[in-house]
Amino acid sequence: MNHLDTDRAPLFIAFEGLDGSGKSTCARLVAERLGAVFMTTPSPEVRAYRDDLIASFDGCQEACQLFYLSTVFAASQTIRTHLAAGRSVVIDRYFLSTQAYAAFRGSRLTIDSVESLLVPAHATVYLEAPLAVRRERLRQRGTSHADRETLAEAADAALRTEHVRRAYLDVVGRFITVDTSAADPDALAEQVVAELRSIGWRAA
């Protein structure tokens, strides 16, 4: 297995994409190939009580947004520690999706400027999959309520727009779009590693 060249500075890569894009699987595989720490937002510990906490907000999307942002800020602090110790990090969802989903769900908080307080990614890999592909993948794995709300054509379009229109933010780093509709997970991971090599990072 190829790993990141240890003579180079550590790398921070964020993975973003709509539900069913293959994001989580690809992020894990890329972390393995880079010899990087794999993280998620929310963390596994927070996921254990997330649903009950979100339900307690009684539909207040601003509260939901602030909750998810708190997990991003906590992750940023951990990422800073890993990078300072020379460890690369790959994270499954970061600031971009937090803000995109909040806007899609109707939050009235326009606070993209807080991104300046976060550790910026060297690159954000945005995984694209057509709606029909996402629907089939989610059907096979089983869908949650959160998944289902993204599967209407209007929702799919709105979420894509909310992600892409924030691609310029400093916290995003270099924005790399990868089509996941055809390749298998291992091939996609190799494609992403190749993209990272093209922007100055290479596997040892």
Image: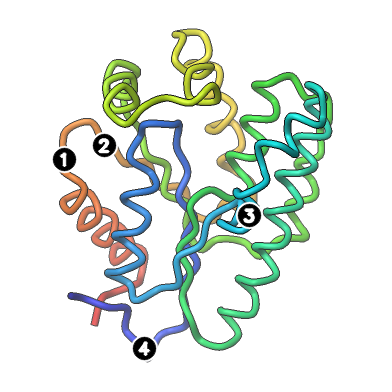
Residue at 57% across / 79% down in the picture?
82
Direction from residue 127 to residue 180 in the image, left or right: left
Residue to which mark 3 is pinned? 171
Question: Identity of the amino acid at label 1?
Answer: Ala
Q: Give the quarter of the figure containing the C terminus.
A: bottom left
User: SS of the residue at dot 3?
Assistant: helix
Q: Which mark is residue 183?
A: 1
Q: CA distance from mark 4 to mark 1?
A: 29 Å
User: SS of the residue at dot 2?
Assistant: loop
Q: Residue 33: where, in percent of width, then height?
A: 27, 69
Residue 54 in the image: above or below residue 187? above
Residue at 42% across / 42% down in the picture?
126
Residue to which mark 2 is pinned? 180
Direction from residue 148 to residue 168 in the image, left or right: right
User: SS of the residue at dot 1?
Assistant: loop
Q: Earlier in the sequence, mark 4 or mark 3?
A: 4
Q: CA distance from mark 1 to mark 3?
A: 28 Å
Asked whether disc 4 touches disc 2, contact meaning CB atoms under 8 Å apart, the reply is no
Asked whether disc 2 touches disc 3, contact meaning CB atoms under 8 Å apart, the reply is no
